[in-house]
């Protein structure tokens, strides 16, 4: 049978859950982070669930919608899962922007949490 | 109207590019220019984290730990793309034996498969514009020092059309008394091609 490997199933479930929460009510994202989690958001570092949630809750848009173009999942040597997402998003009435995001997921007490999260918009206006 | 661009991004977007202008001093402990012909990425050993109780001390330590890990990551990234572009046959030396690469959705596992893959891949010209990195907390990795790195930029294969790309690496460190050797455990590469609006 062509069943997807378990890490792909877990990874894609997580991704779906994450963006659904993010788009509908991102204050609910707390459950996926722990005190050891790190977020790098557009180059800024945040450590710990509280700091991360503060950042995400304070992002300056009312409406947000993510659309995933591609996602890749791999198991890591330490039984974690690394997931990479490439897609587009639209915040309020702004033009659509590309983004990419990477998550490291770990199973702690039977729940998959995110220990590392790195987000970047795909802006191409360097120099 | 792009009002949210600046609000999304209070971080250091130009930082990586600025640091790698030719005229600037590199801020890693060994000059990256001198290491261009290395086949492995070796850095000074990462300092052990003390188990201190003071939150202030641990915040400072954490930041130091992050900085060290990120400097190692930057050095790694420079060597990786240099090797990819100019010494392609040496590239697999930067991977662990059981490393996996996913290249635009194609899974490549193990050194032999990686060697074949890189052999078939046309010659490349990479330009990295952005780098982010995070150390992975020991809770997640059972004491093996691990760093996550995300890069993005542009690449041309065989002198053809330029593509935007994103790549992420999971690097693990093998530490001895004298140095730390970094290798790739996981690698994931994708083009980020634009739908023209």
Image (spheres, rainbow, N blue to C red):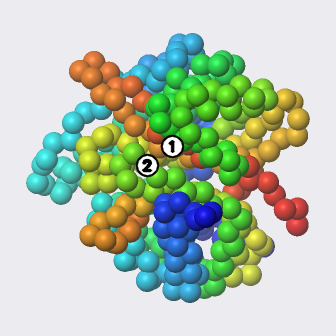
| Residue B66 sits above or below residue B42 on the image | below
Which of the 4 image quarters holds residue B14?
A: top right
Q: Secondary structure at mark 2?
A: loop
- Circle 2 chain: A
**The N terminus of chain A is located in which quarter?**
bottom right
Note whether residue A71 is visible: yes
Could you tell me residue A38's position as x and y percent? 39, 58
- Circle 1 chain: B
* Image marks 1 and 2: residues in contact by CB distance under 8 Å: yes
| Residue A45 sits above or below residue A27 on the image | above
Q: Which residue is mark 1?
A: B186
Q: Secondary structure at mark 1?
A: strand
**The C terminus of chain A is located in which quarter?**
top right
Note whether residue A41 is visible: no
Q: Residue at x 25, y 33 (%)?
A: B47
Q: Nearer the viewer, residue B112 or B45?
A: B112
Identify the disc placed on residue A76: 2
| Residue B109 sits above or below residue A101 on the image | above
Q: Residue at x 41, y 22 (%)?
A: B42
Q: Residue at x 84, y 62 (%)?
A: B195
Q: Residue at x 55, y 50 (%)?
A: B12
């Amino acid at each position: 049978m062509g069943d997807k490997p378990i890490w792909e199933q877990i990874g894609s479930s997580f991704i779906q859950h994450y963006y659904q929460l993010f788009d509908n009510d991102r204050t609910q994202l707390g459950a996926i982070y722990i005190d050891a989690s790190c977020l790098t958001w557009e180059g800024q570092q945040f450590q710990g669930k509280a700091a991360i949630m503060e950042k995400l809750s304070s992002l300056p848009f009312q409406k947000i919608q993510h659309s995933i173009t591609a996602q890749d999942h791999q198991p890591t040597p330490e039984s974690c899962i690394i997931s990479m997402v490439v897609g587009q998003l639209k915040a309020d009435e702004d033009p659509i922007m590309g983004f990419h995001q990477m998550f490291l997921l770990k199973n702690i007490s039977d729940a998959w949490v995110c220990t590392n999260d790195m987000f970047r918009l795909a802006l191409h206006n360097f120099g | 109207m792009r009002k949210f661009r600046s609000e999304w991004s209070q971080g250091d977007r130009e930082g990586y590019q600025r640091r790698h202008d030719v005229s600037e001093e590199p801020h890693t402990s060994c000059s990256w220019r001198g290491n261009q012909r290395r086949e492995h990425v070796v850095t000074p050993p990462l300092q052990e984290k003390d188990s201190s109780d003071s939150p202030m001390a641990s915040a400072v330590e954490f930041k130091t730990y992050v900085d060290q890990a990120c400097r190692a990551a930057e050095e790694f990234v420079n060597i990786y793309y240099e090797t990819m572009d100019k010494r392609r046959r040496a590239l697999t030396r930067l991977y662990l034996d059981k490393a996996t690469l996913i290249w635009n959705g194609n899974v490549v596992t193990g050194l032999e498969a990686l060697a074949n893959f890189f052999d078939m891949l046309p010659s490349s010209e990479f330009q990295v514009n952005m780098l982010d990195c995070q150390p992975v907390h020991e809770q997640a990795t059972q004491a093996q020092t691990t760093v996550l790195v995300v890069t993005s930029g542009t690449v041309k294969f065989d002198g053809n059309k330029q593509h935007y790309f994103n790549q992420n690496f999971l690097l693990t460190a093998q530490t001895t008394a004298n140095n730390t050797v970094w290798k790739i455990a996981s690698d994931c590469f994708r083009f980020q091609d634009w739908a023209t609006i």
